Image (cartoon, rainbow, N blue to C red):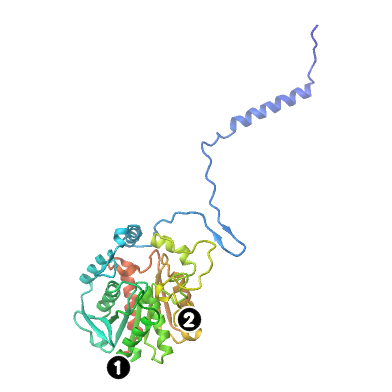
Amino acid sequence: MRASFTIPAGLRRAALAGAAALLAACAHAPAPAAEAAPAPATVTVDPDGTVHVPAMSIPITPYLSPEGQAYLVDHLLTMKTPEKLAPTPELGAANFLQAFIDRQKILFPVNRADTEIAGVRVYDYTPAGGVPAENAKRVLINLHGGGFINCWPACAELESMPVTHLGGFRVISPEYRQGPDHKFPAASEDVAAVYTELLKSYPAANIGIFGCSAGGMLTGMSLAWFQKHGLPTPGAAGIYCAGNTPPIPSYFGGDAVFTATAAGEGRFFAPPRGAEAPVRSRIGYLADEDPYNPLIAPAVSDDVLAAFPPTQFITGTRSFDLSSAVYTHSKLVRLGVKADLHVWEGMFHGFYTNPDVPESREAYDVMVRFFDTHLGR
């Protein structure tokens, strides 16, 4: 005999309703994703403020000219091509600079005498048509870049020819003593010797001094050296591709060592995480010295900076000298010194060696106008 039972009407209606709801939900449920979306990158911050940034890709900025964009790509690829970075004895620098020198010689014809001033070898540049009358009593000193170890004569050529031709200035570029054969203060002494000799023919107010990279560092170092040794202050200074902060761990410090170097040079100069703060510079020329000496890092001394002449800075957002330039500029402004800062978006360390890029032409223009405005006549 089979047992039988009856489901109460209320319970049956509830069961049917639940089944209907389940079927409706299944009918409208989205199809399962074929592949899970990647987790968003996470930035973390330590209690001491250290920021940990995940790996990322940095595209070429749209704010560069088309020529500037192509130049940035070429520069980054050049920095990854060892044969282009091989030094050439005739240049005292990487061989890829030869093309820029050849191009500048076409665009910026100048006269160049290889001579000596105060026992220091110099290149003496003048405009091809002669120095114009309005600049007859004005002169510039260019201090070439090269890390206090090389880039003579290449950097002297690349830094001096545009300013000589476009500004109508006489430009003296000394072959100052560098490492590894020489140590600080040899370069400062050579610059002071040349400057002292020029003071016999030009008022201090009519003499300008400028340089890029190590030459920009040496510009500030020379101004401090002049002060210490009782020499009058020049009329104007250009600290390009550089600042005057303590040269540790290498040339320049600050955020830019971490944020700008890889994007501008295709390399990474920052010290490894957890490394002890260096007490000496990695620059051989300065390695035996206190990097906080105002004669090496004028930005550490308000007294030294307060006596600077009108000073111009040129750098780029992908240049590892950016932080040093910004910091030195801000201190000069706080001290009441006339100081101009020009930062080119997307440009890298020493970018203006290429004369065919609009950004380089803009840099030449502000250099020439700055010295024309601030030098005496």
Determine if residue 287 is in view: yes
C-alpha span from label 2 to label 1: 30 Å
* Residue 35 position (above or below residue 351): above
Reading the chain from its start, which is encountered first: label 2 or label 1? 1
Residue 160, image x and y in percent? 28, 76
Determine if residue 309 is in view: no
Q: Which residue is mark 1?
A: 200
**Is the N terminus in the top left, top right, bottom left or bottom right quadrant?**
top right
Q: Which residue is mark 2?
A: 293
Local secondary structure at mark 2: loop
Q: Nearer the viewer, residue 160 or 8?
A: 160
Residue 88, image x and y in percent? 26, 66
Asked whether, in this view, residue 138 is left or right of residue 293, the answer is left
* Residue 368 position (above or below residue 78): below
Q: Nearer the viewer, mark 2 or mark 1?
A: 2
* Residue 336 position (above or below residue 96): below
The 10 Å Cα crowd at callout 1, few under 14, some 14 to 19, many 20 or more, is few
Residue 246, image x and y in percent? 47, 75
Amino acid at the residue labelled 1: Lys
**Is the C terminus in the top left, top right, bottom left or bottom right quadrant?**
bottom left
* Direction left: furthest residue: 129
Measuring 50% from the left and 83% from the top, which residue is drawn there?
Answer: 301
